[in-house]
Image (cartoon, rainbow, N blue to C red):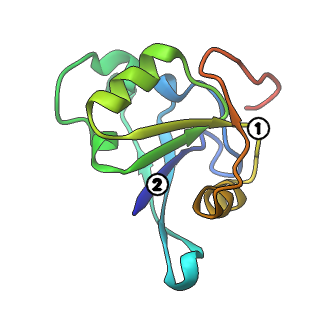
Amino acid sequence: MRIAVASQNQRTVTPHAGRTRRFLIYEAGSGGEPRLIDRLELPKDHTLHHWGNAPGHPIYAYDVVIAASMGPNFVARMERHGVEAVATSVTDPEEAVRRYFRGTLPTLPPEQQIHGHS
């Protein structure tokens, strides 16, 4: 399983999943421990907000997207492409992925926004 974590600053889980250009890519290692395997940086015109409903976006290749906030349209679009979208208050990317695999990741409703993250 591969998980894309929105991380515009490459250090924390950041909000606005549809406008994020940078993602940390994790997969489960042995024993379910997350392992950072890649960093995805999208051109400005490739954010999901700009992409629209066209098929083939790079994020559609992952199983899960985690961010600090996302709108209901983002969640619905991900669902249509077979990607689970999860908003969380956890700010450490690796911890968020670890807790996702354990089933203990606190989640936020899609319309709730977390402010103060950059």
Which residue is pictured at 68% across the width and 59% down the height? 99
Q: Residues within 10 Å of mark 2 (few under 14, many from 20)?
A: many
Tell me the amino acid under the disc marked 1.
Ser
- The answer to which image quadrant residue 6 occupies is top right
Residue drawn at (41%, 60%), measured in percent from left and top? 2
Measured along the vertical axis of the image, is residue 91 above or below residue 15?
below
Q: Residue furthest left?
A: 55
The spot of residue 22 in percent (x, y) is: 50, 42
Q: Residues within 10 Å of mark 1 (few under 14, many from 20)?
A: some
Residue 89's disc is 1
Mark identifier at residue 97: none
88 left or right, relative to 62: right
Q: Which amino acid lies under the numbered mark 2 shown in the image of this protein?
A: Ile
What whole-number distance in Å separates the C-alpha atoms at marks 1 and 2? 17 Å
Q: Are marks 1 and 2 in contact (CB under 8 Å)?
A: no
Q: In the visual, does 61 lie left or right of 70?
A: left
**Image quadrant occupied by the N terminus:** bottom left
Residue 103 % position (x, y): 64, 56
Seen at 53% across and 29% down, the residue is 17
In the rendered view, tell whether residue 12 sits above or below residue 78: below
Q: Residue 78 versus residue 59: which sits nearer the camera?
A: 78
Q: Seen in the image, is 29 located left or right of residue 90?
A: left
Question: Quarter holding the C terminus?
Answer: top right
Image quadrant where residue 52 sits = top left
Considering only order in the chain, which callout, 2 or 1, is on the residue closer to the N terminus? 2
For label 1, the SS is: loop
At 67% across and 54% down in the image, what residue appears?
Answer: 96
**Where does residue 13 sit, x and y in percent of width and height?**
67, 43
Question: Which residue in the structure is indicated by mark 2?
Answer: 3
